[in-house]
Image (tube, rainbow, N blue to C red):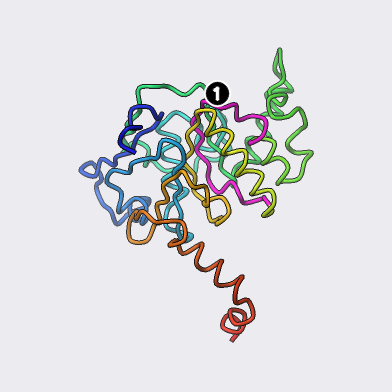
Amino acid sequence: MEGFKYNQYLRSVKLYRDEVESFDTYPFCLDAVNNLFTLEFHPKVTFIVGENGTGKSTILEAIATAYGFNPEGGTKNFNFSTMSTHSDLYKYLKLIKGVRRPEDGFFFRAESFYNVATNIEELDKHGIGARIIDSYGGISLHEQSHGESFLAVFLNRFRGRGLYILDEPEAALSPSRQMTMLSRLHQLVQEDSQFIIATHSPIIMAYPDSIIYELKGGFRKREYRDTEHYQITKEFVNNTERMLDVIMK
């Protein structure tokens, strides 16, 4: 990956640890933050995986905010705020960027996607000129199923040559739709895009040209088949009855 470091949009993130007053307080007590020193990104796809509560979403939100995205999601042009729940972690981060700048970008977070969809409708209702929703496929995101609206963003709004930060993008997607997303991700990578993704999906994290960081007492590089997500899913599918017996005892 050394030869790519100047060609990618975002090379790494560093935590200014000397400026943190206490690692016993939120969000610095979270595994993702407490063990953050410098995290290098793959020029194509970086996955961050781990158990609930380890701080994946918190660290992704901070990286996106430090880069200039709205904490609740969207492009850099979104500046709405329905509730200020994001932490000040972004103030303690240093982003090391490549020499090139992305032509497109989006911070996608499943938990606040409804707010992004609502803001698009409000802007189009009072705006002048081309409708924003047209770049998302032309159909109101609220008039589609949750999964369909997620896919509308991936398939229509992401244009390539972009930096895309995704927080649990699989949340509303069926397994087959996750495969559709994986195909679209590959297309965008071929169109000179870079992704940073927090996910629980063994399907999505199977993308081969990537780095997987598993949060377990810090950021640890893992091969796909060595991740806990893959191993548990494989064990359950291959030995369903035995696993159910164990779970239900």
Query: From the image, which quarter does the N terminus lie in?
Result: top left
Residue sitting at the far bottom:
249
| Circle 1 SS class | loop
Give left or right: position of 131 versus 248: right
Numbered-mark total? 1
At 42% across and 30% down in the image, what residue appears? 67
Residue type at numbered disc 1: Asn
Q: What stretch is highlighted in magenta?
A: 154-173
Q: Does the magenta stretch include residue 168?
A: yes
Q: Where is residue 178 in the image (x, y as percent from the top left)?
A: 64, 49
Q: Nearer the viewer, residue 176 or 108?
A: 176
At 71% across and 46% down in the image, what residue appears? 146
Give left or right: position of 94 versus 56: left
Q: How many other residues sit within 10 Å of disc 1, few (<14), some (14-19) or many (≥20)?
A: few
Residue sitting at the far left:
18
Pointer 1: what residue? 77
Q: Where is residue 156 in the image (x, y as percent from the top left)?
A: 67, 30
Q: Which of 173 and 129 is in front in this view?
A: 173
Query: Where on the picture, by quarter, is residue 17?
Result: top left
At 29% across and 57% down in the image, what residue appears? 24
At 56% across and 38% down in the image, what residue appears? 186
Give left or right: position of 62 versus 182: left
> Please, is residue 187 above or below residue 161 in the view?
below
Q: Is residue 84 magenta?
A: no
Query: From the image, which quarter does the C terminus lie in?
Result: bottom right
Q: Position of residue 95 (x, y in %)?
A: 34, 33
Q: Nearer the viewer, residue 83 or 203?
A: 203
> Please, is residue 69 above or below residue 172 in the view?
above
> Please, is residue 125 above or below residue 194 in the view?
above
Q: Position of residue 175 (x, y in %)?
A: 67, 54
